Amino acid sequence: MSAPVPTRPHGLWLDDLSVGHTITSGTVELNAAAIVEFASQYDPQPFHLDADAARGTFFDGVVASGWHTAALTMRLLADAFPLATGIVGAGVDLTWPSAAVAGDVLHLEGAIETITFSRSRPDRATVVLSHQTLNQHGQTRQKTSARLLAWKRPD
Amino acid sequence: MSAPVPTRPHGLWLDDLSVGHTITSGTVELNAAAIVEFASQYDPQPFHLDADAARGTFFDGVVASGWHTAALTMRLLADAFPLATGIVGAGVDLTWPSAAVAGDVLHLEGAIETITFSRSRPDRATVVLSHQTLNQHGQTRQKTSARLLAWKRPD
């Protein structure tokens, strides 16, 4: 099995990565219309849709679906961590210490925690990248530990 | 602190739940246009966008973003597990054993694994719900362990 065809020919291969490698992303702004649009499709609960209906609920106002925060995190990650073979996730652990709200300008900060080579296929490894999704005030909206597949640069 | 205002007045409170409580959701069909639409906004990688560009990449064709599968899973869960106070997630662990593709008709099957009451606030608990997102052929597209907040029925 050789490495997959690159999705970013000038991107990063395992040869370019090491534990402690840090990432910082660009930013994306979350607005009220986007919160409602996402929630209408994927998470139609009152506290994501309507200020009146959200009053007194757990969030006591409209907040973004955590899955919206997760999707925006993916968008930021795709550019912040340009693996040559793409961001191929085997799995993730994530928490939402606080909910994102309209007006949040989100960015990521993270680092590679471990790189574990496959025993049977030594040209590939699982890279664990931990990253936080922060707003402009430094509030953490998501903590993610992602298990990503990566390959050595082909000969 | 009393329980939040219900988002589903006839929904489930902690009093209604026990370990082993099972859920089965309705279904949602994933089509090719939706895969591209989601990916264009949140995960613009070639293997989610374009069949030609996807050839030879890890997925060797167009597959749904794992975050799209996660978002559809949330949509199914909101109805399949109608907690009175809404689905409020503290965090999740998830894996994607295989990628969802156009034509998949997805549904959830799951069960409550644990219910852990808060020591300081005995009217609330963290409910761990494990669930799988399966297609019509029984292929598992996502395995999720979700930590959800739930409350006792108010007096």
Image (cartoon, coloured by chain):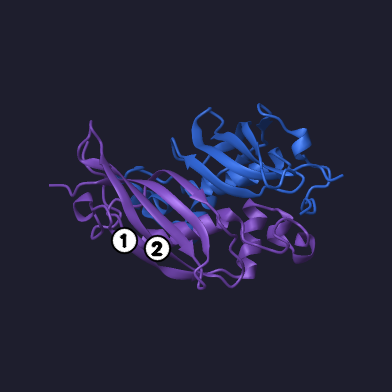
Chain colours: A blue, B purple
Name the element at disc 2. strand
* Marked residue nearer the N-terminal end (2 or 1): 1
Taking the spot 72% from the left edge, 55% from the top edge, the residue there is B58
- Residue A146, located in which quarter of the rendered image? top right
Taking the spot 45% from the left edge, 45% from the top edge, the residue there is B92
In the rendered structure, the residue with mark 1 lies on which chain? Answer: B
- Residue B49, located in which quarter of the rendered image? bottom right
> Could you tell me if residue B12 is visible in this image?
yes
Q: CA distance from mark 2 to mark 1?
A: 8 Å
Q: Residue furthest front?
A: A120
Q: Position of residue B102 (x, y in %)?
A: 61, 69
> Which is nearer the eye, A103 or A87?
A87
Q: Which mark is residue B22?
A: 1
Amino acid type for the residue under numbered disc 2: Glu
> Which is nearer the eye, A149 or A47?
A149
- Mark 1, other Cα within 10 Å: few <14 / some 14–19 / many ≥20: some
- Residue B59, located in which quarter of the rendered image? bottom right
Taking the spot 68% from the left edge, 47% from the top edge, the residue there is A120
- Mark 2, other Cα within 10 Å: few <14 / some 14–19 / many ≥20: some
Provide the residue designation for mark 2. B109
Q: Position of residue B93 (x, y in %)?
A: 47, 46
Residue B57 left/right relative to B97? right
Q: Position of residue B26 (x, y in %)?
A: 40, 69
> Could you tell me if residue A101 is visible in this image?
no
Taking the spot 66% from the left edge, 46% from the top edge, the residue there is A149
Tag 2–tag 1 contact (CB < 8 Å): yes
Amino acid type for the residue under numbered disc 1: Thr
